[in-house]
Image (spheres, rainbow, N blue to C red):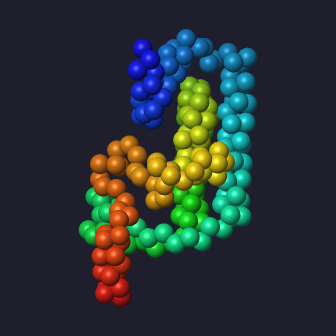
């Protein structure tokens, strides 16, 4: 039993599936048509959403104040999703990298909020509020920028920049940071210009 719990704790995909299963069971038991349940759920969702937006802006402020101008060089592999045929050489600073990753996470959060609001306000479904209430907190704590800048975890191992792709995108190739790959891509980029 302990090994199952450890697997759930360590693997984000397994954790997500376990949380989804528990929430689906709860939505079958809870009657969301009752106003005394729906109003607190709406208030909790709004509070968590505002907290999440506030923490994104707070993290952005921390990144800007740190102003880490350490140069990062890496190679993004060509992937079918990106539409690029060749790997792309990237030279940026830690500050810009973190701000770009934070902005991408923020945009994803806004899409999720919009989808949830559409499903709740237009279609009349309440369970997405519960799902997003829980997954917003979990997702916030799983963000690499939040772990580094809010929780003050060191940027080593899994938090080393550039961050590794997670989930389904990991199978398309990881960012290359070894010296040879970076030098080859930099020379190729210089020849092309």
Instruction: Relative to 184, say whether 114 is above or below.
Output: above
Instruction: Relative to 28, say whether 186 is above or below.
Output: below
Q: Nearer the viewer, residue 36 or 106?
A: 106
Looking at the rendering, which quadrant does residue 189 occupy? bottom left
Q: Residue at x 49, y 16 (%)?
A: 25
Q: Is residue 74 visible?
A: yes
Q: Residue at x 62, y 18 (%)?
A: 32
Query: On the picture, is 190 further left or further right than 111?
Result: left
Q: Nearer the viewer, residue 88 or 39?
A: 88
| Residue sitting farthest toward the left | 85
| Residue sitting farthest toward the top | 29
Instruction: Relative to 7, say whether 89 is above or below.
Output: below
Q: In which quadrant of the rendered image does the N terminus lie? A: top left
Q: How many marks?
A: 0
Query: On the picture, is 171 further left or further right than 50?
Result: left
Instruction: Relative to 72, say whether 129 is above or below.
Output: above
Q: Position of residue 56 (x, y in %)?
A: 66, 51
Q: Position of residue 136 (x, y in %)?
A: 59, 37
Q: Residue at x 57, y 51 (%)?
A: 154
Q: In which quadrant of the rendered image does the C terminus lie? A: bottom left
Query: On the picture, is 192 further left or further right than 140?
Result: left
Q: Residue at x 67, y 33 (%)?
A: 45
Q: Position of residue 96 (x, y in %)?
A: 57, 67
Looking at the rendering, which quadrant does residue 175 occupy? bottom left
Q: Is residue 57 visible?
A: no
Q: Position of residue 20 (x, y in %)?
A: 47, 26
């Amino acid at each position: 039993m302990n090994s199952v719990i450890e697997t759930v704790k360590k693997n984000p995909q397994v954790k997500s599936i376990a949380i989804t299963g528990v929430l689906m069971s709860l939505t079958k038991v809870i009657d969301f048509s009752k106003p005394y349940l729906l109003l607190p759920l709406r208030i909790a969702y709004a509070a968590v959403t505002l907290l999440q937006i506030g923490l994104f802006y707070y993290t952005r402020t921390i990144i800007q104040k740190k102003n880490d101008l350490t140069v990062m060089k890496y190679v993004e592999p060509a992937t079918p999703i990106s539409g690029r045929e060749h790997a792309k050489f990237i030279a940026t600073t830690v500050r810009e990298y973190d701000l770009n990753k934070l902005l991408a996470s923020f945009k994803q959060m806004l899409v999720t909020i919009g989808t949830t609001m559409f499903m709740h306000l237009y279609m009349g479904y309440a369970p997405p509020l519960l799902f997003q209430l829980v997954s917003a907190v979990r997702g916030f704590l799983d963000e690499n920028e939040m772990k580094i800048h809010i929780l003050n975890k060191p940027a080593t191992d899994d938090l080393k920049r550039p961050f590794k792709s997670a989930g389904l995108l990991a199978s398309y190739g990881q960012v290359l940071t070894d010296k040879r790959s970076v030098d080859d891509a930099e020379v190729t980029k210089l020849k092309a210009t």
